[in-house]
Image (tube, grey):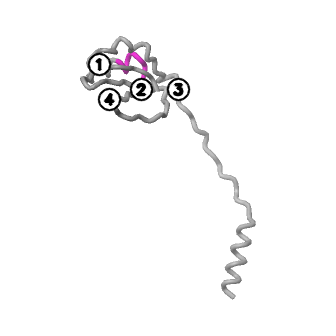
Amino acid sequence: MRVLALLSITMMSACTTASPISTVPVVQPDASAFACNADAAQYAVGQKSSASLAEELLKKTGSKTLRWMPPRSMATMDFRTDRLNIAYDDAMVITQISCG
């Protein structure tokens, strides 16, 4: 008897409609506020990488974040408009500067 009552309650609850969930609007930050401009940093290709140079490049490119890309390493393919990528070789010399 209890099983039958439980089964009928379960079946009845499956027929009810759920009330809509209220959503809070998501505010996206302005992407242009931290848009990277790699052209402003191309002068550093061929220079020895350092923390002070990286800080300078962040300011010159308008980037919010920096990603060092060591030789023979893998990187995620996600694209971020606010990120500066700096690739370097075994001698710690910058070989490529890009955004993303």
For disc 1, the marked residue is 53
Write down the region rendered in magenta. Answer: 57-63
Q: CA distance from mark 4 to mark 1?
A: 19 Å
Q: Nearer the viewer, residue 99 or 17?
A: 99
| Mark 3 neighbour class, 10 Å CA radius: few under 14, some 14 to 19, many 20 or more | few
Q: Can you tell which quarter of the image residue 61 is in?
A: top left
Kindly identify the amino acid type of the residue bearing the numbered disc 4: Pro
Which numbered mark, 4 or 1, is in the foreground of this view?
4
Question: Pointer 3 and pointer 1: residues touching (CB < 8 Å)?
Answer: no
Residue 76 among those drawn in magenta: no
Q: Nearer the viewer, residue 74 or 3?
A: 74
First in sequence, mark 3 or 2: give its number: 3
Q: CA distance from mark 3 to mark 2?
A: 11 Å
Mark 1: secondary structure: helix
State whether the magenta stretch is mostly helix, strand or loop: helix
Q: Residue at x 46, y 21 (%)?
A: 36
Image position, residue 48 (x, y; %): 26, 18
| Mark 2 neighbour class, 10 Å CA radius: few under 14, some 14 to 19, many 20 or more | some
For disc 2, the marked residue is 64
Kindly identify the amino acid type of the residue bearing the numbered disc 2: Lys
For disc 3, the marked residue is 31
Q: CA distance from mark 3 to mark 4?
A: 29 Å
The N terminus: image quadrant:
bottom right
Image position, residue 65 (x, y; %): 40, 28
Task: Decide: is 35 above or below 72.
Answer: above
Image position, residue 91 (x, y; %): 24, 23
Q: Residue at x 39, y 35 (%)?
A: 74
First in sequence, mark 4 or 2: give its number: 2
Which numbered mark, 3 or 4, is in the foreground of this view?
4
First in sequence, mark 3 or 1: give its number: 3
Q: Can you tell which quarter of the image residue 56 is in?
A: top left
